[in-house]
Amino acid sequence: MSYNTSDPDFVLAFDELTLWSSMFGLMLLEHIPLSTQFRKILDVGCGTGFPMLELAQRVGPSCTVVGIDPWQAALEHLAYKARAQGVENIEIYEGDAAAMPFAASEFDMIVSNLGINNFADPEACFRECARVLKPAGRVVLTTNLRGHMHEFYDAYAETLRALGMPEAIAALHEQQAERTTIEQLQTWFERTGLRMHQVHERSATIRYTNGTAMLRHYFIKLSFLAGWKKVVAAGDRQHVFRELEASLNRMAEAAGGLALTIPMAYVEGKKP
């Protein structure tokens, strides 16, 4: 297949990655086992196709990579990118990770890049993965861990403390605790008949000029801001976030920028 780099459709498919997904997806691609013994791989929560399309090309045409996600618009874009890139060894399904339309023991490997962050019932999804995975099959996932962006959360808690809002502080801490841990992942593996056997951890840093820039970044607004605002009453949000932004800006001025730490994990397991 030849590529026309002047074709707007090609350009749209070429510029495909979000910074957030890419950090974790590259970690997955660094550690994932690659072998011709894997004939069918499932990407749970495949979204718009990263790392699914990249993985399909790295494993080669002897392997089929199947993607499932409930996000119909994302799957349409995934199919478009696959056509533009000439990736043919894929299948795409719209569906729920907790009730997948696949036979038992169908897949040699299951991967999920950040999918666990979006599962309403992670344990049910792990159980379903165990069902469709072959004996001795692999489960590979990435996730951010509890403690992510702790610099922001510390500043937020201090702002709430200064404003005399203990209930909001408690709600903020509950929100932080929603992030998973390696111990929690281990529990889900064990409860669903899987065995965790490999973990890699590292930290990434996302830097902004200051809080003003960070709070206006599109991905922050898309994925985090609404949740952060929910910890305070609607009538207090404008004042609280004005104070929080000022606090973050002071931090950035003193430190030469605002740096947020993202603890990352690659976890690999097997089905006995």
Image (cartoon, rainbow, N blue to C red):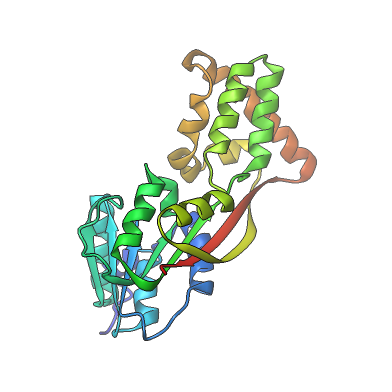
Q: Describe residue 172's horizontal placement relative to residue 252 as left or right.
A: left
The mark total stands at 0
Residue 1 picture location, percent across and down: 25, 85
- Identified at 53% across, 24% down, the residue is 231
- Of 109 and 197, nearer the camera is 197
Instruction: Residue 34: name its quadrant.
Output: bottom left
Which one is nearer the viewer's eye here, 177 or 59? 177
Q: Position of residue 259 (x, y in %)?
A: 68, 47
Residue nearest the viewer, comparing 159 with 110 = 110
Can residue 104 be seen by looking at this rendering? yes
> What residue appears at the point 34 percent right and 83 percent down from the top-left corner?
60
Residue 188 vs residue 18, the one in the foreground: 188
Is 132 positioned to the left or the right of 232 in the image? Answer: left
Q: Residue at x 47, y 38 (%)?
A: 221
| Observer able to see residue 14 | no
- Judged left or right of residue 216, residue 72 is left
Q: Position of residue 176 (x, y in %)?
A: 57, 36
Tell me if 73 is positioned left or right of 60 in this view: left
From what the image shows, is residue 55 above or below residue 193? below
State which quarter of the image contains the C terminus. bottom left
Determine the residue positioned at 54% across, 52% down: 144
At which x and y percent is residue 44? Answer: 34, 59
